[in-house]
Image (cartoon, grey):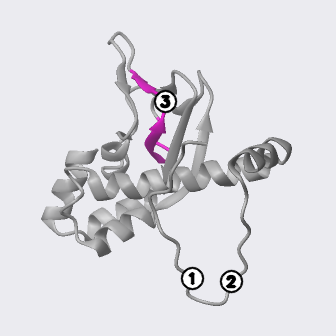
Amino acid sequence: EGETCSASVVTEARSVLWSFEGQKIRELARDLPIIQTRIESIRALHRLDSFFSMHKATDGLDMGVRDRLISCISGIHQAEPGEILGAQGEMIPAVYLISEGKIEYRIPDMPPRAYTADEFVGLGDAIHELPLEGDYVSSEPCRVFCFDTEKLQKMAQDAPPEVLAVLARIG
């Protein structure tokens, strides 16, 4: 109740559509967790699309470059508080774009650096293939988009200088 839709749906082929009242879909999602997971994933992907469309640093990127950046996504992860997402001395296993929550970069004997929604974590480390000086730790429940480091490295190697400048600004 009170919610509105800000998009239109147009089918490209003959389709079967199901219609649910809001309360019924909430009950269905509660009873079938996979439905809730799918809804949350779609919502997260919509947020990602909005991020790349609206972010100051990425809105000027060629659509093909943005699509290639998005193609580097390997999954969506729900990190629990205290979960280590990258350990000191190792290469970061993935680059993270925070959708919700907070991640801290903890280097010994230094105050932690906090990353929050719409910030990339470990992009520079991954592109330059640098081992981490500290740990990336989820400091609260956190939903992140995981980007494949090898695909990002390949993209950076092939990219013109203006794309590298954008990657440096967002990372």
**Foreground of the two, 116 or 125:** 116
Instruction: Identify the amino acid type marked 2.
Output: Ser
| Image position, residue 98 (x, y; %) | 44, 39
- Which one is in front in this view, the residue at disc 3 or the one at disc 2? 2
**Foreground of the two, 20 or 45:** 20
Binning the other alpha carbons within 10 Å of mark 3 as few (below 14), some (14 to 19) or many (20 upward) gives: many
Secondary structure of the residue carrying numbered label 3: loop
Task: Give the left or right position of residue 156, taking residue 139 as reference.
Answer: left
Circle 1 residue:
11
Q: Is residue 101 above or below residue 5?
A: above
Among the two numbered marks 3 and 1 on one chain, the one whose residue lies closer to the N terminus: 1
Q: Is residue 156 above or below residue 107?
A: below
**Tags 2 and 1 touching, CB below 8 Å:** yes
User: Is residue 104 part of the magenta span, yes or no?
Assistant: yes
Circle 2 residue:
15
- Residue 77, quarter of picture: top right
Instruction: Identify the amino acid type marked 3.
Output: Gly
- Residue 133, quarter of picture: top left
**What span is in magenta?**
90-106
Binning the other alpha carbons within 10 Å of mark 2 as few (below 14), some (14 to 19) or many (20 upward) gives: few
**Foreground of the two, 77 or 46:** 46
Mark 3 to mark 1 CA distance (whole Å)? 35 Å
Among the two numbered marks 3 and 2 on one chain, the one whose residue lies closer to the N terminus: 2
Secondary structure of the residue carrying numbered label 1: loop
State which quarter of the image contains the C terminus.
top left
**Which residue shows up at 46% across the image and 27% down it?**
102
| Image position, residue 94 (x, y; %) | 49, 48
Secondary structure of the residue carrying numbered label 2: loop
Circle 3 residue:
101
Instruction: Identify the amino acid type marked 1.
Output: Thr
- Residue 89, quarter of picture: top left
Mark 3 to mark 2 CA distance (whole Å)? 37 Å
